[in-house]
Image (cartoon, rainbow, N blue to C red):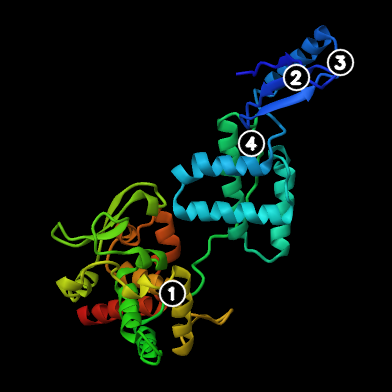
């Protein structure tokens, strides 16, 4: 709806003033008509109305910072998961640091192309740059949907070749070495061992292990009401934006049963009650260093929480079909399961070949 531009007289001002409510910011705007003639002032008011109408009711003078505040309040906080909100804030902050756009209209295809180039110069990966650009594209798409801009800029995200995950899964011997490394810690050795055992058996992400509680319905919790324990995950913690009951494996269920009933309250992993997810990730990598478990020879990167998740997927890939593994890993797309995790270890493949050869020779 095109705002009505009113012609008013203001005490102490020689010229007439034009006043209207900005359709984008919803704030009142006032400018001088530059004349004392009511007829000429009304003509200028009409020209402003037609200009706003020609832009589809949008206002090209909306600041980028005002848009960001509105996007977060009206969309991000309501519709995005906590992880997506974090990516949005990081992408926005990096854009502000790099190019400091003043207006929403400044954030166009040319500026975002320059932004991507600067990120490449800083050594960021194609995947990271693509994530930032997709997040900004979604925000600008929302701006178009509600009429803040007439058209969202076309953004080309860098295409990266589909690769296996960074680093290999750890094997059982390496897992045992990391457990032994816990004994050399100064405090809370049992809690760290409990966490590593849980990661090994559950395939949980670090953030999920940090949130996991015994209290049903607390966001990311355990549900013992059925025949088998399940993860009860509310949509806020899901990439797919939906509530889900996800299965647990029998060995992880047995692991949970080892906790006495009187201790089943609060967080499942007690180490998470006093430490952040980031601190836990860093500490697990330190344990990987102490145990001399290197999962990425190229960067000499030690085993971390994600190495346990890959190990879980690799073990179960040889036991269940891909759709089942997808459910265990809680992947939204099965292509993620197939591309990154459903990979049998080379030694397992070699062993299967030897087993087949042995069966063939026995039959002869």
User: Can I make out residue 158 in this image?
Assistant: no
On the image, the x and y values in percent for residue 144 come to: 60, 33
Mark 4 lies on a secondary structure that is loop
Residue placed under numbered mark 2 in the picture: 18
Q: Are marks 3 and 4 in contact (CB under 8 Å)?
A: no
Residue placed under numbered mark 3 in the picture: 35
Q: Toward the viewer: 58 or 32?
A: 32
The residue sitting at 46% across, 89% down in the picture is: 290
Sequence-wise first label, 2 or 3: 2
Residue placed under numbered mark 1 in the picture: 280
Mark 3 vs mark 1: in front: 3
Sequence-wise first label, 1 or 2: 2
Q: Are marks 2 and 3 in contact (CB under 8 Å)?
A: no
> Is residue 227 depicted above or below 191 in this figure?
above
Sequence-wise first label, 3 or 4: 3
Sequence-wise first label, 1 or 4: 4
The residue sitting at 37% across, 75% down in the picture is: 349
Residue placed under numbered mark 4 in the picture: 152
User: Can I make out residue 142 in this image?
Assistant: yes
Measured in 3D between alpha carbons, the distance from the residue under mark 1 to the one under mark 4, in whole angstroms, is: 40 Å
Q: Toward the viewer: 287 or 161?
A: 287
On the image, the x and y values in percent for residue 165 come to: 49, 68
Q: Residues within 10 Å of mark 1 (few under 14, many from 20)?
A: many
Mark 3 vs mark 4: in front: 3
Mark 2 lies on a secondary structure that is strand
């Amino acid at each position: 709806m095109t705002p009505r531009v009113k012609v008013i007289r203001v005490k102490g001002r020689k010229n007439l003033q034009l006043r209207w409510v900005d359709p984008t910011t919803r704030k009142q705007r006032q400018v001088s008509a530059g004349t004392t003639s009511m007829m000429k002032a009304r003509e200028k008011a009409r020209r402003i109305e037609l200009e706003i109408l020609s832009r589809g009711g949008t206002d090209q003078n909306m600041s980028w910072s005002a848009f960001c505040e509105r996007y977060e309040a009206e969309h991000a906080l309501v519709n995005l998961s906590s992880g997506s909100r974090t990516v949005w804030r990081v992408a926005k902050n990096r854009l502000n640091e790099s190019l400091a756009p003043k207006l929403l209209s400044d954030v166009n295809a040319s500026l975002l192309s320059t932004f991507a180039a600067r990120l490449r110069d800083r050594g960021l990966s194609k995947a990271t740059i693509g994530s930032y650009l997709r997040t900004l594209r979604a925000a600008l798409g929302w701006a178009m949907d509600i009429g803040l801009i007439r058209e969202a800029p076309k953004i080309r995200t860098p295409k990266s070749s589909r690769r296996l995950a960074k680093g290999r899964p750890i094997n059982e011997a390496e897992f045992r070495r990391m457990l032994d490394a816990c004994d050399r810690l100064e405090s809370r050795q049992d809690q760290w061992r409990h966490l590593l055992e849980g990661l090994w058996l559950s395939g949980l992400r670090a953030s999920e292990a940090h949130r996991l509680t015994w209290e049903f319905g607390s966001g990311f919790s355990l549900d013992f009401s059925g025949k088998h324990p399940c993860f009860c995950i509310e949509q806020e913690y899901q990439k797919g934006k939906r509530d889900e009951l996800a299965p647990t494996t029998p060995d992880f269920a047995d692991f949970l049963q080892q906790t006495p009933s009187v201790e089943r309250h609060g967080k499942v992993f007690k180490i998470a009650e006093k430490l952040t997810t980031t601190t836990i990730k860093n500490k697990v990598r330190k344990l990987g260093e102490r145990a001399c478990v290197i999962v990425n020879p190229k960067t000499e990167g030690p085993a971390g929480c994600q190495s346990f998740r890959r190990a879980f997927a690799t073990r179960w890939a040889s036991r269940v079909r891909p759709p089942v593994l997808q459910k265990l890993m809680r992947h939204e797309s099965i292509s993620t399961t197939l591309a990154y995790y459903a990979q049998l270890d080379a030694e397992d493949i070699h062993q299967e070949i030897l087993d087949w050869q042995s069966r063939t020779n026995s039959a002869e």
